[in-house]
Amino acid sequence: MFGLPLLYWGLWLAILILWMGRFVISFMSIYLVSELHVDAGTAGSVVAMYGFGGIFGCLFGGALSDRFGREPMIVAGELGSAAMLVVLSFIDDPAVMGATLLVYGAISSIPTPAIAAYIADVVPVRNQKRAYTLQTWAVNFGFAIGPIIANQLIRFSYELMFYAEAAVLVAVTVMLVAFFHRMGVDRTDHGALRTGSVTDAADGPSPAAPNVSMAANYRRALTDWPLMSMVLLMFGYTVAYFQMTSGLPIAMTEIGLGTNEYSMVLTINGAILCLLQIPAIAVFNRMSNTRVLILGMLMTAVGYAFQIGANSWHGFVAAAVLWTLGELGTFPIAATTVASLAPADARGTYQGVYNLVWSMSQGMAPLIGGWVLANMGARFLWEACTAMFLLVALGLRLTKSARERAVARNLAGLV
């Protein structure tokens, strides 16, 4: 299917189901306010702890997957997340909830870099754009369905959504273990990936080398200028982009729009992604990674610029259509670029460092957006976001040559 190996599709199906069942964090703020009677400010701070916890999970999950293997980290992270969800269902103190969310965020983020590295392990380089784009589609589709399921569950009990998500995590993990075993996925003593069929493997050698040093891989990643420039640029992008879920609802409320209008904007965002993500693969394959990223940044900048003067629901819808078109290529192509930059024996570490961007942004975006809105207003927030996207596009253009040289070196090492 789509020229991708079965080893990829088993994980893809798991990702789709996992994201259909991943809804607790999306409803956590409502749970805190409605059930635990916490004020909105405190609820935001408590939920932000989940994002900060993800920093630790991404940082160590990737390095551990290089050392001990992708599958053990995926399995451990999902089962640990299920256990933490059950614990969360019994907590009614905001401070304890925040501390627990910090731990939950760390554990639930452990599989993220391992999954990204696994895809690079089993998918040939020539097909990785397609693989990461299809992964992003699965996440978006699952994320669109999850809230619908959760909305039905909370009609009976908020606690039920904790148990339902935990059950999904356990069921999918069992399915993955059976799939890995059935497909003949094995590990050498040092954690390198082996498969029963050479044709299912990626173009390069197994991802880990004997006696992999986590410290050495960290030094390697943190001193790799092409990678770190990509990480810094994408951090600027995600802090600005995630204002769609932190600053945007507040800005819409300030002009008299409600949650229904905001929900419709997110629905339009999800619908466009699900409809166009797969057809866009053919377009992306005809363009360089850098070109796709720059065009995505520019389109996103135009969308956020529309929000500067938006004073009606229709204005925000027009803006959402534009920044969603920008998102189509940005997320999957950025992941593809990092996979291309990573040496075969440090893929997990590189993906872990890159995925810090998302966890840090999830924690920082609400804090930065809230402060800007309170002190400078919505117009300044959208102006600042627009400027950030333009700066990131310029940065991607200036660092293009360094990335291409690094990718060429990695490809030469796979021959």
Image: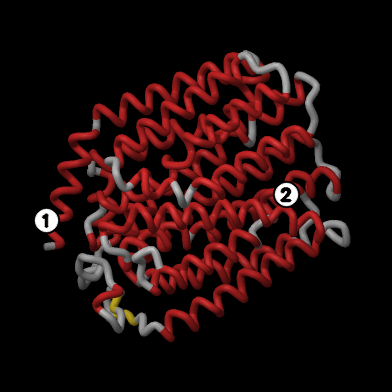
Residue 53 badge: none
Between 314 and 139, which is closer to the camera in this rendering? 314
Figure coloring:
secondary structure
Instruction: Name the residue type under label 2.
Output: Met
Looking at the rendering, which quadrant does residue 236 occupy?
A: top left
Where residue 267 appears, as percent x and y from the top left, is 67, 42
Instruction: Name the residue type under label 1.
Output: Ala
Q: Name the side, left or right, on which 395 lies relative to 87.
A: left
Q: Earlier in the sequence, mark 1 or mark 2?
A: 2
Considering the image in quadrants, where does the C terminus appear?
bottom left
Indicate which label's residue lies in the foreground, 1 or 2. Answer: 1
Residue at point 62%, 53% (across, down): 143
Note whether residue 353 is visible.
no
The answer to whether residue 388 is above or below residue 377 is: below
Residue at point 47%, 62% (across, down): 111
Where residue 367 appears, as percent x and y from the top left, is 60, 31
- Label 1: which secondary element: helix
Residue 412 badge: 1
The answer to whether residue 22 is above or below residue 46 is: below
Looking at the rendering, which quadrant does residue 333 occupy?
A: top left
Q: CA distance from mark 1 to mark 2?
A: 47 Å
The residue at which mark 2 appears reads as 28
Between 338 and 158, which is closer to the camera in this rendering? 338
User: Dot 2: few (<14), some (14–19), or many (≥20) neighbours within 10 Å?
Assistant: some
